[in-house]
Amino acid sequence: MNASRILVAAALATVSLQLAGCSAAEDAVTGGTSSSGFDAVYTGVIGKNCNGCHGTSAPGYNPGETESSLDFTSADAAYNSLKGQSTGLTGNFAACNGKAFVVAGDASKSLLMASIENATRKGYANGACTSASVSAMESRGGALTAAQVSLVRDWINAGAKR
Ligand code: HEC
């Protein structure tokens, strides 16, 4: 009980530190308050745990005959990919073709979120694309921390801005 409270407190402290850190950095550059911008998501999650497979020459991404239309090789490429829809998925995942990776403002309907968070995946249903047809990317890219998952969820719910 005490141990898990300490862990929760540590996790919250980490999230606050990261959020404080990135908004301060962005404010310094832009003078704005875009703490929900995509750069933090790319640096903290996508460019760290996901670009090993979702790149132009990596397994899981073959231009022309892709299993997935995602290109995570840079923040710009990743953002542009995530604005689109899933294409080229086969097998169990075929039912997810045409589904939006990101539904701005609604993490629960976003295929990206379903693929990285167990809880979202369990409740995810978008036509025939259900929890059973979404693969768990957090286990492929190495376990994501709660803070990483929150970073993505908050970014989507805040409007998925670049
Ligand atoms: C080990 C290689 C690998 C890693 C690492 C990886 N992916 Fe994938 N990803 C794939 C492959 C292959 C597919 C095609 C569908 C399948 O076979 O599961 C895919 C499909 C997807 C899809 C399409 C829908 C779905 O769930 O099937 C999304 C969204 C996705 N990946 C996001 C991510 C994110 C976000 C990360 C980082 C947390 C990530 N991937 C890390 C290989 C990978």
Image: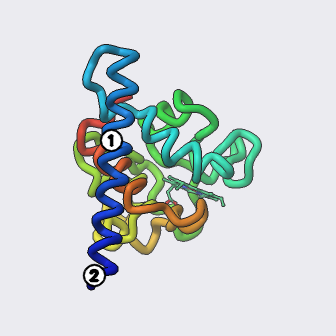
Residue 75 image position (x, y, % from top left): 53, 32
Q: Residue at x 27, y 57 (%)?
A: 108
Q: Indicate which label's residue lies in the foreground, 2 or 1.
A: 2
Instruction: Kindly tell me whether mark 1's CB lies below 8 Å from ligand 1.
Output: no
Seen in the image, is 69 located left or right of residue 161?
right
Q: Residue at x 62, y 53 (%)?
A: 67
Seen in the image, is 48 located left or right of residue 102?
right
The residue tagged with tag 1: helix, strand or loop? helix
Seen in the image, is 57 located left or right of residue 66?
right
* Quadrant observed for ligand 1 in the rendered image: bottom right
**Quick one: label 1, few (<14), some, or many (20+) residues within 10 Å?**
some
In terms of depth relative to the viewer, which is nearer, 155 or 79?
155
**Quick one: label 2, few (<14), some, or many (20+) residues within 10 Å?**
few
* Image quarter of the C terminus: top left
Disc 1 designates what residue?
A: 19
| Marker disc for residue 2 | 2
